[in-house]
Image (tube, helix red, strand yellow):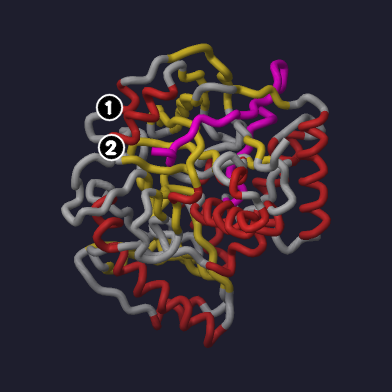
Amino acid sequence: MSTIVIPEILLPKEGTDMSRWAVNACDQFTSDAEYWHKLENYVGGAPSALNLVYPEIYLKDDTEGRIERINSTMHSYLEGGIFTPLTGGFVLVERRTRSGVRTGIVLAVDLEDYSFEKGASSLIRSTEATILERIPPRVRIRESAPIELPHVMLLYDDPTNSVLGCVKRGKKLYDFDLNMGGGHVTGTYIDNAEEVREALCRLTDGDRYGNGQKLMFAVGDGNHSLATAKTCWEELKPTIPDEDLAIHPARYALVEVVNIYDPALIFEPIHRFVKTDRVEKFINGLKTSGDGRAYIVSGGKRTAIAFNSDVPEGIRQLDAYIAEFIAECGGETDYIHGDDQLDRLSASGVGISLPPIKKDDFFRLIVTGGNLPRKTFSMGEGNEKRYYIEAKKIVKG
């Protein structure tokens, strides 16, 4: 099965200040300019993944100029010896957060086996609805880029921990504290990548979910980034000779895969924040019911409200109301990771603090029910997201 491949991974060369190199996912803290300003000041002029990614808080800020600078820096890092290639193996990533140590494996997956279409039966699937209008800006960023840096995290369903149980550790690749309160991360070379690949493939044996479908990976984080990689590949594919299709680097996306049963993998809710000066009208018009509980957050104060115990269905209803409110009254919506950030933002609008979904039936739910509503869950809070460390070429040569 070619869904999983052993890629050439690019790591910063020995001597790089890794605490300045690694930075948080670009789609985090999109309403918190102070976070990114502090990070920029900390990084300074050091080599950093911050210079290779586009923080989404700046998507309306000199877009073309920023993309040009990013691509230019990618080329200068490649040509200037910033990266050291790692071949023949995967990377075992152990990330210490407030929830414990989360263990993942960095590898590459075949985009031919991934789909973000609703109702797809591919081996790799999105878990939430993909917002198609969010893809074109990302395509502009990626289409001229020579490398990719992943914040994509895929989940696999391994209750017996058979995959990590067969891993043979090699040399330590990095071991450092992450900036901006991100915890600590250690990367170790996996000596037996082929054996680990086979163990992952065996997870699709049999009819696990009762309807004949096979699902190897479900996207936990970074679905729009993976959808962008897929879109760019589909656009590029017609220009590639048939004999090169199977080996072209753009066909394969670098990701981290994590067992959904990892005890440090905590499913967090993604809260809704509406920036509006008509807070009272929003609250008075919001009608929810059910045996569950959510909270209205306004002016730093929290008020409990009833919420559907079927959390995805409750989110669908809430999102529909928010869309109707903004259509009538104006305003903006943001998706917030963490109660503290929601509390801070509530001075300029109103937030809905949502309950988490359960992960026990997660794969069965995706196989039988399709995509969840957009931004239904998050794996940890904002500073626990995957930091950019590894890279991979996506152009030939």
- Residue type, numbered disc 1: Ser
Query: Magenta segment, which residues?
Result: 1-27
Seen from the viewer's position, the closer of residues 236 and 178 is 236
- Residue type, numbered disc 2: Leu
User: How would you classify the magenta stretch by its main secondary structure?
Assistant: loop
Seen from the viewer's position, the closer of residues 16 and 154 is 154
Mark 2, other Cα within 10 Å: few <14 / some 14–19 / many ≥20: some
Estimate the x, y position of residue 375 in percent, counting from the top left.
44, 60
Seen from the viewer's position, the closer of residues 80 and 1 is 1
Q: SS class of the residue under badge 1? A: helix
Residue with the most extreme top position: 171
Question: Which residue: 79% across, 34% down?
Answer: 44
Q: Name the residue under label 2.
A: 203
Question: Which residue: 64% across, 64% down?
Answer: 136
Q: Is residue 275 above or below residue 384?
A: below
Say if mark 2 contacts mark 1, CB within 8 Å. yes
Estimate the x, y position of residue 394 in percent, counting from the top left.
65, 42
Q: Determine which quarter of the picture holds residue 368.
A: bottom left
Question: Residue 162, labelled with which disc?
Answer: 1
Is 246 in the magenta? no
Estimate the x, y position of residue 340 in percent, counting from the top left.
49, 50
Q: Can residue 38 be seen in this view?
A: no
Q: Is residue 214 above or below residue 298?
A: above
